[in-house]
Image (tube, rainbow, N blue to C red):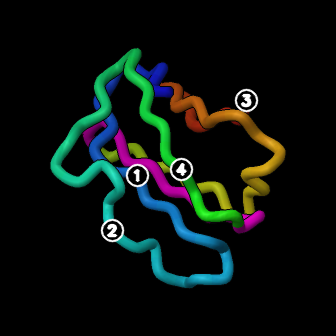
Amino acid sequence: TNNSSSSVRAIYFNPSSNRNWGPNRLGNSILQPRQSITFQLPLEVNYDVRFSWGGNQAAEMRHTDICRISGIIITDEGLRLR
């Protein structure tokens, strides 16, 4: 969920065992403020996630156990898990 005041331009994620971020999961789309997007991930436990938003803001989360969270919230201050 994008709760920041800026558009999210890129979302990258892959299993932590893969050192490559892979493609921008938004493709050519942009996640506007107050919008949400859902991804169905293969059953791996730990993922690395990277978000880019605004002019030059970016945040990463490494080795995130996706089975223990219900979402990621993007804020002007960074990322929060739900």
Residue 33, percent across and down? 35, 19
Quarter of the view holding residue 22: bottom left
Query: Going 33% across and 68% down the picture, which residue do you hit?
Result: 23
Determine the CA span between mark 1 and mark 4: 14 Å
Q: Residues within 10 Å of mark 2 (few under 14, many from 20)?
A: few
Q: Mark 3 falls on what kind of element?
A: loop
Query: Going 73% across and 57% down the picture, which residue do you hit?
Result: 64
Determine the CA span between mark 2 and mark 1: 8 Å
Query: Going 23% across and 54% down the picture, which residue do you hit?
Result: 27
Q: Are marks 2 and 3 in contact (CB under 8 Å)?
A: no
Q: Are marks 1 and 4 in contact (CB under 8 Å)?
A: no
Quarter of the view holding residue 80: top right
Residue 11 marker: 1
Does 52 appear in magenta? yes
Q: Are marks 3 and 1 in contact (CB under 8 Å)?
A: no
| Pointer 3 or 4: first along the chain | 4
The stretch in magenta equals 44-55
Q: Amino acid at mark 2?
A: Pro
| Pointer 4 or 2: first along the chain | 2
Residue 58, percent across and down? 44, 49
| Pointer 3 or 1: first along the chain | 1
Q: Amino acid at mark 1?
A: Ile
Determine the CA span between mark 3 and mark 4: 17 Å
Location of residue 56 with respect to 62 vertically, above or below: above
Give the residue number, with chain letter if any, for mark 2: 23
| Pointer 1 or 4: first along the chain | 1
Give the residue number, with chain letter if any, for mark 3: 82
Q: Are marks 2 and 1 in contact (CB under 8 Å)?
A: no
Give the residue number, with chain letter if any, for mark 4: 40
